Amino acid sequence: GEGSGMAGRRGSMVGGPAPDAGDEELLFSLASKSSISVTELRHEAMLNLERIGLVDEDMRALSRAVEVNKSIQSLWLSGNAISNSGTTILSLAVAKSHSLKDLVLSANEIQDLGVKALADALRSNHCLRTLHLNHNELTDESATLLAAALAANPKSALTWLNLNANRISDKGATALAELVKAHEQLTELDLGHNAVTDQGAVALAQALEKSTKLAKLDLSGPHEREGKISHEGAKALTSALARNGSLHTLVLRNNKLDDSDAHLLAGAVAKSKGLIQLSMRGNALTDAGVKELRSAWKAGGRVANRLYA
């Protein structure tokens, strides 16, 4: 899960509230920075404002656009310079929105303080389905705040939480593991390129044993063999795979797994009810370990090119 990796089609124009002079000035200031017109800000279902140099001051105008645009569904803001104060302003609009489904805040300058406001918004939001906060400056505090907010909102619609490439360690992973147990909607959790060790992997594996919804889990390390998950984590995940029927994609690349872990995972692959994609590249597997994994994968009747080892 690196980058937002999203593509979409702009929605059709629909009616909206009558223009207000103050709104028009705010929206014009935002439109002047982008290739999107004021009319589109008011009515389009998808607003792509990625990599156009937006800063915190622009979030006041964007928040107003979200409030007046009753048909907005996707807001892409990756690669800008939005920090805590801008995220706080935007969060007020997210809390009120009844239409926003996808929010992409990847590769900005957001820290825990900004996520605190966003988490508060998620406690009352019933429509947001995907939240991308990858490549920011988030720590365990952000993971804990988001987990608590989503667990406290039984009507939350969030299915995909992308926290890739931040500074989250085992404390944050453990908080998110509790969310996986409790949250009935979450199907995709991306914690790759963080600092999760065996302790966090074990917590998430235990959550997987109870989860009937989570379909994709990314625990990849940042670079080849630089991840911190080793035998203890692999053992717990292996046990979880034998019991879990919902997980279809497990990403463990760039960790410290070796042939003994490949042996464990090969046994789990044989028992797993749902796994269709496994990524193991960048670990310490030899040809023998890769061969054993591929043999188990093939024996299970899976598509060969969905095993990355």
Image (cartoon, rainbow, N blue to C red):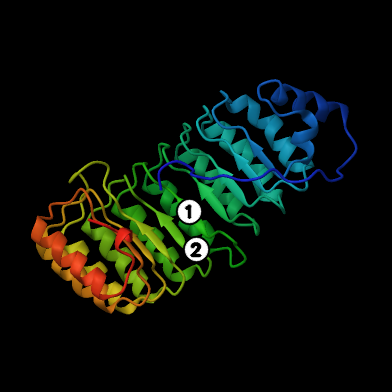
Which is more toward the observer, 105 or 95?
105
Structural distance between the alpha carbons of marks 2 and 1? 8 Å
Visible in this render: residue 235? no
Question: Which disc is residue 161 wearing?
Answer: 1
Tell me, yes or no, whether the two marked residues, 2 and 1, touch with CB atoms within 8 Å. yes
What residue type is disc 1 on?
Leu
> Residue placed at 64% from the left, 31% from the top?
59
Helix, strand or loop at mark 2:
loop
Where does label 2 land, which residue? 186
- For the C terminus, the quadrant is bottom left
Residue 215: x and y in percent read 43, 65
> Residue placed at 24% from the left, 55% from the top?
280
> Residue placed at 52% from the left, 70% from the top?
184
Can you tell which quarter of the image residue 46 is in?
Answer: top right
Which is more toward the observer, 215 or 177?
215
Visible in this render: residue 151? yes
Residue 126: x and y in percent read 65, 59
Residue 219: x and y in percent read 31, 54
Q: In the image, is 192 to the left or to the right of 261? A: right
> Residue placed at 41% from the left, 41% from the top?
138
Q: In the image, is 241 to the left or to the right of 135? A: left
Which is more toward the observer, 163 or 41?
41
What residue type is disc 2 on?
Leu
